[in-house]
Amino acid sequence: MSISSPGAGEPPYDVFICYAWDDSKHLADELHQALTEVGLNVFQDQPSMDDWDEMAAEIRAALLSSRTLLPLVSPGFPRSPHCRQEVHLALDCAFRLGRTDRVMAVTSGVRPDDIRPSEVSRYRTPLQGRSARELAVGIAERVRALAAEDDRTFGDAPLPPSPDWFPEHLPGSRHFHGRHAELWEIHEGLRAKEKARNMGHPVVSVSGVGGQGKTALCAQYARLFALDHPGGVFLVRLSGSDRRVRASPDAVRAQFTEGLRAIGLKLGLSADELGADRLPGALRSRLKKLAQPYLWIVDDIPSGFDEELLPELCAPTGDGRTLLTTRGRFFKEVSAEIVLGGLDPRDGLSLLTGHRPPAARAETRAARLLTELLHGHPLGLTLAAGLTTRDDFEGYAELYRQLATPDPEDDLLELVQYLRAELPAGYARPFAATMLRSFRGLTDAGRDVLSAAGVLAAEPVPLPLLDEIIAGAGTSGGPASVADGLAHAVRHGLAELTESPERTAGPDATPDSRACTVHPLVARATRVLNPPPTRRKLRDAAVVALTQALSATRHSFTHRAVARSLPHVRAVTGLLAGSDQWGIGSDETYLLDEAGRAYEQLGDGEASLRLYAPLAEACEEAPECDEYTRLVVRLHLASAHFRYGQFSAARSLQEDVVSRMRDLLGPAARETLTAQDNLANTLGALGEHEASRLLHTEAYRALRDGTGPTDLDTLRVLGNLVIAVGRCGDTDAARRRMRLTAVRYARGAHVLWRRAAKAKGPESWEALGALDIMNTLGKNLLALGEKDEARDAFRTVWEGRRAVLGEHHPDTLDAWENTIIAEEGLS
């Protein structure tokens, strides 16, 4: 018998019986009769579908109309795709209803430890010689007790809430299929009571070869199990998947610290707290105040990373639950390890045939063989599914023949050899054949899109940048052609179009939030398929496009428009591990210099430092690099050290640059005076306030007399002089006198800044300078006890910076903190 789902106005099912036909049919029939006799409304399906068929609509409707699921877990139960589908659907709904005891297993011939997912074993009744009548009485008692407390059905489960992501969401894959058991294994592992090495919280690692879907699985877990982590999801992305990335602890720590800083910015840590020394403690303190469970994801840890150092990467507080992904294996330092293999055959078949269902049973058999050929590899199946969208698709049998016995003229050897270092034995050849056929099956515009992404970093590529690169390489018919090419690549499973969750209006907006993402394995394979001249042309176009975009930010604070392009600078200049190793010439030097400046002005001193350090080294070693360029780069490197809080390193570089610039350009040259002013700032940060004031005064007078009182450089030095004056004085009386002087200087400087800003507009550097001098005025007024006026000044600065720099910029946060301090002083 097959009972249909309740009609309109009919009561819901109390129990849905889920069982394997081969070894539990008799028990299912007996239980159905016994449960009905004790007054329950029961659904029992008579399986009539092939194992490869999707869950029928009427079965799904009946399950969603049920209060509880009764899986009859027998030795044959895990082999039934339909049983697994029903259990996972019921568990997912039960979790969102707040009670997974709605899934109540009856076990026969299996050990509790062998039940998967293990959540099913939490509420089980062993058969152990009990009659169907005895089981029915106990089940009915539990079902009625549950209904009295909560009479909802599985279909009443709310959608999972959207978690808060820090610093940004982890894009999921639209091709994500299956992995239900693994999702529940993560859930169970992160609830583990046993802690690895007393780290204070559970740590689960997800490992597997490239393209197996580790990152996508974590993203799916974070979304579906958002109720597990109400405190949010914190994401740090490393770059260990490329085989050429060195797993040195220092390199990993540097990248990890960069990720922590991005989280700190999103949490609103102050500029001081974001410094290298204070960041870990400040972040730990902020997360302790959160006082809620949160998920801590560290994605793509290098496989050679020292396991003893793993605790350094884990969640900073006991409320965190850590989820790691790696191509390697961790044993000692984790609570649970999940090793991803190929997809379940049914899920793999579903992924492969998602675009074009098989037309006959013979085609279904061929599709199964193709799934086996690709070892259930999700990325390989995604590419194969893309091949079924082609107009010349001749069926799954023909596609299987093409991929199993590729044409010898296809010359797969180079790609296969490359992929053998990326994929285990047996995977490389069929994946290479699929990748090659997919790439060659693209339109010219589609190959352009994929090839352009291949020379960039493994980060989302903003569509305007993609347009500029392809146009610059001379192969594009314009944005419309690029859009068509991207759509074709997406249809083939080679790329994805993502929408940034960032705001699209207001000061923190991005002009175009759409971006193209390409799986790192696909991007690296694309580089092999592209001859060096093609890669070089695209790389050169990327250098030009990025340079033009960054140069435009010199005249006003428009950095938000290029912030999402900055990660690609290191790839096109050869500084990114695993990318092509381009030489650093004059074009690359200028681009790195512009990117370092942009990072610094965005408040990311560490990223700026990571660009300027290798640039300065390259300039010193390059014989064609002139002395002036070397000095400018060293000056910018010193500024990066200063911004990052490394004042001694900044001072050493600045003293050298000032001396060499005086010899090269003369003591009155604008560049020399700018370097001298930077040195004075560093002396002030080191506490040498009088020496700082004297250097600032000398630089200001020379610039005022040489370039005029409202020149931008003159005004900047004047602002720095005001700060230095306010810090001087050896006694209380002397300090008060100097602060009064600083207030007077600040008011006069503000008039000059406002006059300059009026002509340049609200987002000009002059407008920001007017806010900076107002901030200095507020600090001196606060120190003098003028709290009302100080508060008004800080509020003006905060509102002005928020409008121009954005809400999360360190300078905005600093002004907000000053406003709070002033208001607390008033109270």
Image: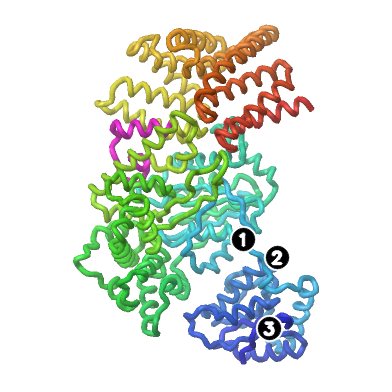
User: Can you say whether 659 is above or below 130 in the image?
Assistant: above
Q: Would you identify the image quadrant in which residue 443 lies?
A: bottom left
Would you name the residue on which mark 2 appears? 98
Would you name the residue on which mark 3 appears? 6
- Label 3 sits on a secondary structure element that is loop
Between 521 and 712, the one lying in front of the other is 712
Q: What x and y, as percent, mark residue 769?
A: 54, 23
415 vs 643, left or right, is left
Mark 1 crowd level (few <14, some 14–19, many ≥20, 10 Å Cα): many
Report if the CB atoms under discs 1 and 3 are less than 8 Å apart.
no
- Label 1 sits on a secondary structure element that is loop
175 vs 226, left or right, is left
Magenta residues span 570-596
* Residue at x 66% of width, y 17% of height: 780
Would you name the residue on which mark 1 appears? 225
Which residue appears farthest toward the front when viewing the image?
759
* Residue type (three-letter) at the residue carrying disc 3: Pro
